[in-house]
Amino acid sequence: MAIAHIAMPIAAWQLFDYWVPDGLEIRRGDIVRARLGGRKQVGVVAGIEPTSDFADRLQPIDALTDSARVTDEIMALAEFVRDYYQAPPGLAYALVAPPATTRLRRQRRDAKADTFAANGDVALAQAPNRAQAAALETLAAAEGAFGVTMLHGVTGSGKTDVYLATAARAIARGGQALILVPEINLTPQFERRVKAGLPDARAVTLHSRLAAGVRRANWNAAASGEAQIVLATRLGIFAPLPNLALIVVDEEHDDSFKQQDGVRYHARDLAVWRARKRNVPIILGSATPSLETWRHARSGRYRSATLPERADARARLPEIRFVPARSADAHDGVSGALWDAIALRLSRNQQSLVFVNRRGFAPSLKCVSCEWESECPRCAARLVVHRQPDRLRCHHCGEAKPLPRACPECGNVDLLPLGFGTQRLEQAIRTTFPAARVVRVDRDTTRTKDAFAAVRKKVEDQAVDILVGTQMLAKGHDFPRLTLVGVLGADNALYSADFRATERLAALLTQVAGRAGRADLAGEVIVQTDFPGHAVYRALAAQDYARFADELVSERAAAQLPPAARIALLVAEAHVRADVDRFLDVAFEQATALCDGESGVEVFPPVPAAMPRRRGYERGHVLAQGAHGRALQAFLPRWREAIAARAGTRVRWALDVDPTTF
């Protein structure tokens, strides 16, 4: 009698033994149904053994589903995720299971893949310039074997053309190309670029907003090798591609590649691991490479190629201007210089983007009499003022309340909205320029399917004069008539306690500034700031991300922070703060004992999380730091086992390896 070890997402940490009925052929990677707790569940077969310690109590597997089995390569990827990220096996294997396996019998079997035509002969928008040609030579030298190439190109430098030319060569050799993008909203534009550049290749998309049947059909097209190009968000790293010959990670610096809950993997790092295992090249592209990638390229571990100029010979990088955030001629939070610049673009029939990375009307509501402020009862955060309808909303837990007519503390009716969000900025611009066509782009206005695509079309059709938006507009979008970018509230990031704050701000400002002047019209960027001499702004003004990144890498090395060191967070939350504190105190003691006499790992005492209360849970963490990855990886499994042996049920906890947030 054969015994199957089955991973089920519903029981995250355990593998369960089931006996295989006679006549049923089961292999590692098969998707099966079996009973757990009296209910039928879907699981992944993690292994087959001849015996079990629980042989007299085992239940049989009910059925082998008609879902394709998970390949050995993808099973190995799941096991790497399990081991490196200290993830529950059930959740790690669930990542690699074919989509919609739990609803398999109710799926339409005739669902067609959502494909777009894409040929082995690439049709670049124009002949490659000297830098693009040099980059293509570097990438051609890396074909046929594993190697990581950092493609550092300024905004508008034609990185996508380089990706597609390299993908064309991979397809011509009979291979498949996996292209990862950080956000769903970037896929439609990328689809059009693929269709134009590779007009005959079969391509599919994979992301969470696809209908279940379409997503499954696209997954099958990738798994069968029929799809030559797979364009995906981070979940695409788990797609089986039998003929994989190239991986591209576009905007590789973006935090969206890091999963922030459940299994906290980083898709960029998994892409490098997968490329190594398949012995294929990988391109990490960005105008603002992550410091991890930058450091590897500087050390020679990664190849590098640079695109220092815009691909369109008519285009130049925009002029950068800094103006005071609180100038005498400002009104409604916008400086006089920015108002004048917007008016000038309107007179020229050109487009403007006004960027503020806060949605809603105002970040807070305050009583001018007793200084009461609107606070979320479930989070350590203020409730944000929203209009139409008038509400106070928490952007962390979704708590919503009617906008009060008077202060709940003293009854004063003079309540003041503090600060500016996208709604308030939109209102101010409409009031100042009543004839202008203004469109706001944030999470509130793009909730429905195809809403963002509709905005893009309006911009392309020149039916928009002024865009007001958040970081959704900061990267990847190409609007030829957009010549002005105004940035509000950038200084807020400089007050963050997160050591990555300046790196993120530099990336964000570089990306949003890059939307201006991408064709024959000159671009201008106006940044409102009280600190124009800050290193971030100096780098932006000089268009010199390389120097800025070198300086940051040196600072991190001196402080023994990533990328010079590796870190992991034990994160914990409970309804009662005392429960969190006790749990973390014990975990810290366990870690200290495990590290006693062991070099290379240091553990720091418990501290509250950056947001100490969220969704009604009190939160805290313990940080473990390793001088190198091997020492930390040797320590973490032993620490996790010690924690699990004493953990109760009142505290939810997880290990976050290589965290990007605190």
Image: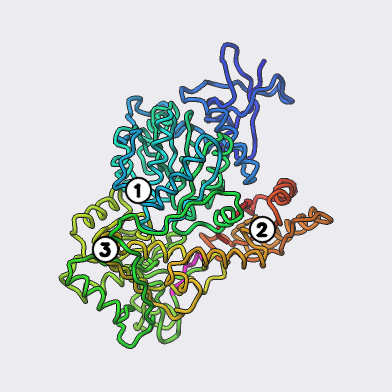
Is the Cβ of the residue at disc 1 closer than 8 Å to that at disc 3? no
Residue 89 spot, x, y in % from top left: 62, 38
Quadrant in the rendering for residue 229: top left
Q: Which mark is residue 138?
A: none
Which image quadrant: the C terminus?
Answer: bottom right
Whether 79 is drawn above or below 321: the answer is: above
**Identity, as a three-letter code, of the amino acid under mark 1:** Pro
Callout 1: helix, strand or loop?
loop
Marks 1 and 2, Cα distance to the nearest angstrom?
Answer: 39 Å
Which image quadrant: the N terminus?
Answer: top right
Quickly name the residue at label 1.
128
Residue 361 spot, x, y in % from top left: 34, 70
Asked if residue 376 is among those painted magenta in the image, a careful observer would answer yes
| Of the two numbered discs 1 and 2 in the rendering, the one whose residue sits closer to the viewer | 1
Q: Which residues are magenta?
A: 374-379
Callout 2: helix, strand or loop?
loop
Q: Nearer the viewer, residue 382 or 290?
A: 290
Q: Assign the magenta stretch its main secondary structure.
A: loop
Asked if residue 243 is among those painted magenta in the image, a careful observer would answer no
The answer to which of marks 1 and 2 sits earlier in the sequence is: 1
Residue 23 spot, x, y in % from top left: 57, 11
Q: Which mark is residue 565?
A: 2
Callout 3: helix, strand or loop?
strand
Number of residues whose C-alpha sits closer than 10 Å to that of mark 2, classed few (under 14), some (14–19) or many (20 or more): some
